[in-house]
Image (cartoon, helix red, strand yellow):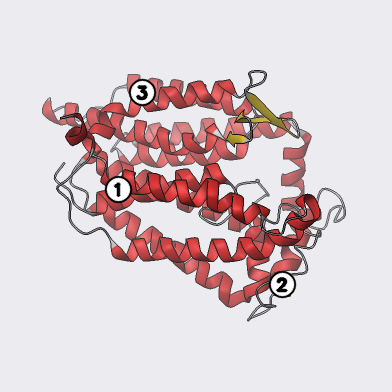
Amino acid sequence: MLRNSVIEKNFKKPDYILLSVVGIILALGIIILASVSAPYALEKFGDTYYFLRHQLLWGLIPGLILGFLAFRINLSFLKKTAPAVLLINLILLGMVFLPIIGSQNEGAYRWIGFGKFTFQPSEFLKLTFILYLAAWFASKTEKIDSLKNKRWSSQTLAAFLMVAGIITILLFLQPDVSTLGVILLTALVIYFSSNTPVWHTVLMILLGGGTLFAFVKMASYRANRFLVFFNPEVDPMGIGYQAKQSLIAIGSGGIGGAGLGMSIQKLGFLPQSISDSVFAVFSEETGFVGGIILILLFLIFLWRGFKIAKEAKNKFSQLLAMGITSWIIIQTFVNIGAMIGILPLTGIPLPLISYGGSALVVELVAMGLLLNISSKKTQ
């Protein structure tokens, strides 16, 4: 009985266009990571395949397994367990500050480590918060409809702000303001998509903008990112170095690119070349054509994701699909926008491509859930 409640048997074919797009993006990610990471891995570990192997063993393989389970899981069961899953994730988010268990890197407390195994709870929070909000607002909508009362009380807004506030405090203390921004923007999309009053959304935008301004003022490195954004020529060998080198890498690719493995910027010139700067190296090696193709793939993902949300069988599936699609696209826009200079640098990785086991696992689980919804199961 338990297995039948967890694993859904009645399902049809998933969205093969979405599946193909995700597969192509994954393949491009593995290829470019193999190229980008080799010099750095050789210098740091004496093994050109160190980062690639780590990504395959701790990101791709477990991500595909868990993604398949997410594709088969009963969404009704997932809806019921969403609050407990979020609570567990929040506990793990707090555990990063504990001695021994918590892992610190360059002053940031973002990882939990058990021996050589480490993971980043904030990456999983991107999905668990979406699950929680989809379940909560779906139940709220059903209750309102059953009572024939279209009013959303201010208590709902207050409860939402309280949960968002807890997450804000935990991520600010790490600190991981960039991830916080992606999570809150995604949450705002879900809130707005739940037919809530427009003034609620406007109020949250104002609160979010004020909070962001306060966070920027609190840390000089965040203020420097905005300074470089508004004045790209400032201190090109200091605070403006990464932004400058990113544009050099993209410009060096020309129309057709320098060729796979032929990037110059990855040879120690471009910081974070295997994570948040990977698009710049990708564009250097594949050129304008490669960059446009990658952007088009994400736009197709956006189209299919919103189509799945529109055709979803119930409110929970609709909001879940909307949340997952918005999260991936917001993060993609923020990453690529920072690399081409239309947004400040944030440190946000490029979904399905940047190096990072925790990020890849949770993104593949999200893809499994999106394909799950697209298969039009009886829920």
Q: Amino acid at mark 1?
A: Phe
Q: Which residue is mark 2?
A: 251
Quadrant placement of the N terminus: top left
Mark before the other along the chain sequence, 2 or 3: 3
2 and 3 marks in contact (CB < 8 Å): no
Left or right of residue 234: residue 32: left
Q: Is residue 324 visible?
A: no
Q: Which residue is mark 1?
A: 71
Q: Position of residue 35 (x, y in %)?
A: 66, 66
> Which residue is denoted by mark 3 in the rendering?
84
Number of numbered labels in the structure image: 3
Q: Is residue 280 above or below residue 333?
A: below
Q: Amino acid at mark 3?
A: Ala
**Residue 201 image point, x, y percent:** 41, 36
Residue at image position (73%, 74%) is 252
Where does residue 95 sit, x and y in percent of width and height?
57, 21
Q: Which one is earlier in the sequence, the residue at label 3 or at label 1? A: 1
Above or below, 159 relative to 112: above
Which marked residue is nearer to the observer: mark 1 or mark 2? 1
Q: Nearer the viewer, mark 2 or mark 3?
A: 3
Q: CA distance from mark 1 to mark 2?
A: 40 Å
